[in-house]
Structure formats: C-alpha cells, structure tokens
Amino acid sequence: MSHEPSLIVTIAASFGLALVLGFVAARLRLPVLVGYLVAGIIIGPASPGFVADVALSKQLAEIGVILLMFGVGLHFSLEDLFAVRRIALPGAMIEIPLVTALGAGLATLWGWPLGGALVFGLCLSVASTVVLVKAMEKAGQLQAMNGHIAVGWLIVEDLAMVLVLVLLPPLAGVLGGNGSGGDGASLAKALLLTMLKVAGFIALMMVIGRRLFPALLWQVAHTGSRELFTLCVIAAAIGIAYGSSALFGVSLALGAFFAGIVMRESSLSYRAAQESLPLRDAFSVLFFVSVGMLFDPHVLLDSPLRVLAVLAIIMLGKSMLAFTLVKVFGYPLNTALTVSVGLAQIGEFSFILAGLGVSLGLLPQEGLNLILAGSLLSISLNPLVFHAVEPLQRWIRSRSRLARFLEQTDDPLAVLPMTFSSEELTNHVVLVGYGRVGRRIARALRDRGLRYVIVEENRDFVETLRGKGLPAVAGDAQEPEVLIQAHIARAALLIVAMPDAARASRMLAIARLLNPDIGSIARVHSDEEAELLQSENFGGVFYGEQELANAMISDIDIQLHRHLTGQH
C-alpha cells in the first residue's frame, strides 16, 4: 500500500492553488491575500473534494509567522519601541477590556454563559500581527511612526494574551467550564510565574542575546558561505522562537520578534533581512491559506446576522475605540486613522484562544465558527480599508469644522512657544521627522549654528526637545496649521527626513503655497520615489543606496589617486 507524503501534498496544493487564485484576485483588482484565503477554503475540510492536512498547514503557517515577525524585529530597535511606550502601552491596555466588553455584551444577548461571553470578547480584542505587518508594508508605513505605534500596540496585546492563556485554565471551573477552578493564591502564583518568565526571557535576550547572536552571525559570515549565513539566520529565528515558547511560555511570534531585535545589533542585519525575505514571503502565504482551511462557509448561511455583528465589532467598534484613544493621546489625524485601520482585524491569537475556550468547555462551537468567519472577512477587507485612509482624510479635511475638531488645534504641543523670537524663526530650517536620520541632521544644523524648527508626530520626542529648549511642534506636517506653527512662511529650507514620497510631496505643496521661494530636501526609499519627487522639482532628493554608492565611489577616487601619486 503506497504512502502518500502528506507534507509535500499539503505544500504543493497550498502554494499551487494560492498562486492561481492570488493571480485571479490581482487581475480582479482585489488584494492577493483574498485569493490565498479562498484557496484555503477550497482545500479545507468544509469543502468537497481534496482536503489538505489542516494540522500540517497550521504548523507551516507558524513558520511563516515566525519568519515574518523576525523580519519586523530586524527593522526595529528597542529605541523605536521605547519611543511609543506612552501610547502603545496604555492604548492597548484600555482597548482590550473595552472591546472585550463589547463582544461579551453581544454574546450575553445571544444567551451565552459568562465564561463563553468573556472568551468570545477577548478573541475579538486582539489583532493579527501578521496581517498588520503585511498591510503596513504595503502602505509603506511600517518604518514610519504610525507603523511603530501599531506594532508596539500589538506587542502589548500579545503579552496580555500570553497572560490570558495562562490564567484561563485555572479560571475555567469558576467561569462554568471544565475543571475545578482555582483559588486566589493559585491564580496569583500562575500570574506571577508567567510575568517572571516573560521578564526573564526579555532580560536574557537583551543582555545575552544582544551580544551572542550578532557575534555568531559575524563568525558565520566570515566563512564566506551564503548557504551557512542563510541557515544561521533561519535557525536563529525558529530556534529562539521555539525556545522562548517551550521554556518561557512566550508566543512564537513574540519570541521571533525579540530575536530580530537582538540580531539588529549586528552590522549584518540588513543582509540577514534580505536573505530571509523569500522564505518570509513564501511561508506567510501559508498563514493565509491555513486561515481559509479553518473556515466553515456554512456559518454565513446559518447565522448571517451574527457574523455581521461580529464583523461590526472588529471593523467598526474596535477601530473607533482605537481612533478615539490615539486622538485622546494627542496624535494627529493621519496616525489615528492608520493605527485604527491596522487594528481592524483578528487573527492567530484569536484562533488559539478560541480553541482553548472550546476545549475548556467555555466557548460553544458556534463561537469558534463566528470568530473564524470574523477573522476571514476582516482580513479580506483590511487591505481595502487601508486604501480608504487617504480618501477619508481628504473628506474630513474638506469639512473644516470636523477637521478642526479632530486635529485638536488647542493641543499645547501643536503650538510653538512664544519664547522663540521672530528673528530666531526667520530664514530658518523646518525639519520634518526626528528619527535616526532627523536627529543627525538636527545635530549638524546645531553644530553649524543654523536655526531650525522640528516637526514631529511623536509627542514624547517633542516634549523631550522642548525640555532642552529646542523649538519643536507636534503634528502631521501635511496639515497647513502645523507648518504655519513652524513658521514655514519665513523659512529658508524644508527638510523631510522621513522616507515617504507621497507625504513629502503634499508637504512641499503646502510649503510652496505659503512660501514660494522655499528650498526643499527629501529622503526616499527607492528610485521610483526619487523620480516622483524630482518630477515635482524637489530641490534635493536623497536615496539611501544611491548615496552610499556615491560615497564609496568618492572614496575609491581618493584612494586610487593616493595610490597612483604615491601618497599615503
């Protein structure tokens, strides 16, 4: 009797059908991930015909989650996460109970017991990191402040869900599920143990990992073997993720994310990101296919109104809460819209939690089906909603009263202090963005004795700068009011230090409207973006790789000249 290789069949069917349906979706101008999800439904157990191995598919999808979060960590730093702590931490910790209450309230109206309602609400409160990262990358926001806030927000959500997964089993009996329940002492012990494990893992990665893994990467790179280097990167990502889960109870995604952060300390981190990119993209497809495989389309026919109610909480209730929280913390409209849209979906943690709830006798099977339906629909619609962010901003700004209300013009950090004289703010530089590049530019301006005003969306940065007596304004420089506060009308130069060509173009249009003679310099990420800004007569456009090549060529000329002339 022949044995069918289930792993190969599952991979072949998943990739093959995902390719075909992804291509069809692209031709229909739909997000390609819709094709991946439909591919999963077709080869899943709820559809007739061939059925792939669901368990194997879920494990392959976990590899995709690990590699994707490892890649995100490679592009982030502790400084990036620390910079958004004042919004990501309280924002997530306020949003989780509020969304949980919405979901639990809806389930209670359906007659579900307290335990099932609570688990159901928690499942709706946590967004998918994989979906968020993909959407942010597509929108070019992952490396921007908006991306940092959204990713930081989800890291807090992931940590909160780790605690929930630990505490739910001992609480199951009390909540009406299987088990005898636990007393207050055992719950406190479980909570303390989990927090100690998480803290121990983070400390281990930050203290030992930051030295060990970059050194290991450097030693492997010295062998000159590309295969060994790629193997080292993949082995580190998967090994650390698994080790963190097995030893510390941390999620695979969170473990991989911190693995990327410690690897970022290496000068080879960019190469590591590039080498692992093809595998990240391929295995992330399997994540979406596996989501489709879990989905039972019959729930759409059996409970259409309940599915719509769940989708409304995920995409409207959760988004509105996130939008309100971001605005309450004083961030601009663009940030509030981008973060709220990014959180308008649910994914992997919701499946894990729902599965645990069913096994503990808390969540009815219908609850699991509704969560899967809400996940699939919200993931499918999320890219489309992202495309609506720009038109929605334009619509809001076309209505001056609504725009003034949402932009919070009474924010003290959005108004430049009166301590700066008109002489100080004449023929000055307006510097937009105070990230790694912006800080270096500001330092160079200061060393040259040049006057400048910093425009930054991160309020913590603005508070710090003002504490040092430097002129800084909090807000989105796409808004005329923000540039007016930076005295753009009397400025000599506009420098956009954030790599976003579309936003830089809008900033320059506003700046030229207020100051036709202003000079301009911008930073971009690609040749296409450079061409876009150059076509709009941006004064200076700098592309990272091109500038690096120019500097190296210049040094080549100098060293060759020294060699040929005998100078040393």
Image: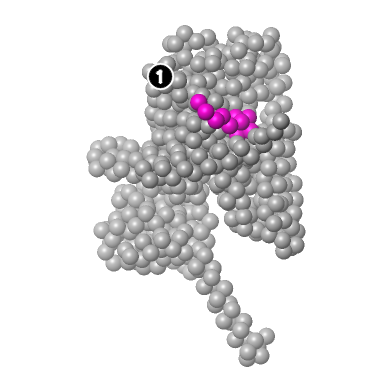
The residue lying at 41 percent from left, 65 percent from top is 541
How far across and how far down the image is residue 384, in percent?
A: 38, 39
How far across and how far down the image is residue 565, in percent?
A: 63, 91
* Residue 528 in the image: above or below residue 104: below
Q: Nearer the viewer, residue 223 or 85?
A: 223
Read off the magenta span.
48-58
How far across and how far down the image is residue 34, in percent?
A: 44, 37
- Look at the image and say whether residue 509 sits in the magenta stretch: no
The residue lying at 75 percent from left, 62 percent from top is 223
* Residue 104 in the image: above or below residue 430: above
How far across and how far down the image is residue 424, in percent?
A: 38, 61
Q: Is residue 22 left or right of residue 205?
A: left
Q: Nearer the viewer, residue 253 or 206?
A: 253
Q: Is residue 260 left or right of residue 507?
A: right
Considering every residue shown, the one lying at the far bottom of the view is 565
**Does residue 40 show up?**
yes
What residue is shown with label 1? 301
